[in-house]
Image (spheres, helix red, strand yellow):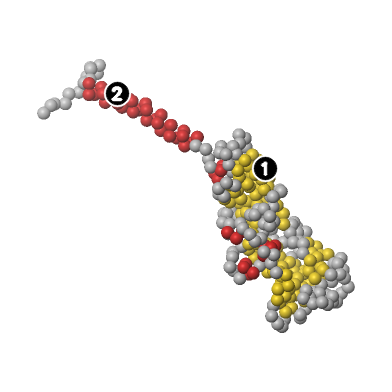
């Protein structure tokens, strides 16, 4: 058994002790650089498109003016609702990869009630059968050409990588209703005015989205919910130009910009769109309902 001796200051230490001191010195020198190298590599790793795109500003509103009524035609009543508007300023840092992204607005209709009453005869109604019967949660409100986008002018912007500079742009959209409703019963040969009421209540979800054109990767950037309501009372006995009165609302509810994004239902991304899928029905007070205008798809 060996006894332990302490080395006096200035004395030479044994080779084994020297080896340990040198090993510790080496580790003390190398480990921080390795750690720094790891941190450096994490920091320098390029961010994905999903993580790098920045929404600088989002605005959404419905114009404060009331729905306007047009009785200039002896065949139909026309009305124009205030516009829903949405816009966003988007910043995309340099894109390192050779990839193409489209950024823009996608919209879907979640609910639709659209009834035109003709006194005691019955009512006509524009309907979305699958949405009405709850077979789907939403239906595309695309322009019918550029699926799934609402449009392809101000509504979208394309970023083609690789890019060396930031890309900053604004994408915007607007929507409103401007339909024509016959004064007389739509399934009758008579031209006698009998329209007595128009009611409409529709809800929409609008998404700001980025989609990779090659992989179809979809990044939801912002979600907006909005609603348009309408009630017009009509007195068909009065002379043309004095029949219709807007009852409510005089000012629409403002849209909601959601704090948490909602997923996009599958049907909101594909054909058919709402315009092509809608059906005009006649629902008489007595008798069976009938299709007046079938769907276009």
Relative side of 24 to 91, left or right: left
Residue name at image x 62 percent, y 35 percent: 165
What residue is pinned by disc 2?
A: 22
| Whole-number angstrom distance, CA of label 1 to CA of label 2 | 59 Å
Q: Quadrant of residue 290?
A: bottom right
Q: Residue furthest right?
A: 239
Q: Quadrant of residue 50?
A: top right
Rate crowding at label 1 as few (under 14), some (14 to 19) or many (20 or more) other CA atoms within 10 Å: some
Earlier in the chain: of badge 1 and badge 2, it is 2
Up-down relation of residue 243 to residue 218 (above or below): below
Picture coordinates of residue 252, whole percent (x, y) = 72, 61
Up-down relation of residue 227 to residue 48 (above or below): below
Q: Residue furthest left?
A: 1
Secondary-structure class at tag 2: helix
Q: Residue furthest front?
A: 297
Q: Quadrant of residue 95?
A: top right
Tag of residue 169: 1
Relative side of 181 to 203, left or right: right
Secondary-structure class at tag 1: strand
């Amino acid at each position: 058994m060996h006894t332990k001796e302490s080395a006096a200051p200035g004395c030479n230490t044994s080779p084994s002790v020297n080896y340990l001191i040198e090993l510790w010195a080496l580790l003390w020198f190398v480990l921080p650089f390795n750690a720094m190298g790891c941190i450096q590599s994490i920091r320098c790793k390029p961010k994905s498109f999903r993580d790098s795109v920045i929404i600088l500003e989002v605005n959404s509103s419905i114009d404060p003016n009331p729905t306007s009524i047009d009785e200039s035609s002896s065949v139909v009543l026309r009305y124009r609702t205030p516009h829903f508007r949405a816009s966003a300023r988007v910043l995309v840092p340099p894109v390192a990869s050779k990839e193409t992204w489209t950024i823009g607005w996608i919209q879907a209709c979640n609910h639709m009630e659209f009834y035109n009453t003709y006194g005691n005869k019955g009512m006509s109604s524009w309907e979305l059968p699958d949405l009405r019967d709850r077979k789907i949660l939403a239906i595309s409100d695309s322009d019918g050409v550029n699926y799934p986008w609402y449009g392809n002018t101000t509504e979208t912007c394309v970023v083609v990588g690789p890019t060396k500079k930031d890309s900053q742009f604004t994408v915007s959209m607007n929507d409103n209703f401007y339909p024509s409703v016959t004064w007389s019963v739509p399934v009758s040969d008579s031209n006698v005015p009998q329209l007595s009421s128009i009611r409409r209540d529709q809800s929409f979800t609008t998404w700001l989205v980025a989609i990779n054109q090659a992989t179809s990767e979809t990044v939801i950037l912002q979600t907006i919910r909005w609603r348009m309501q309408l009630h017009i009372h009509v007195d068909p006995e009065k002379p043309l130009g004095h029949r219709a009165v807007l009852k409510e609302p005089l000012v629409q509810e403002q849209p909601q910009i959601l704090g948490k994004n909602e997923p996009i239902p599958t049907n909101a991304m594909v054909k058919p769109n709402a315009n092509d899928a809608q059906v005009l029905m006649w629902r008489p007070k007595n008798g069976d309902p009938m299709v007046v205008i079938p769907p276009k798809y």
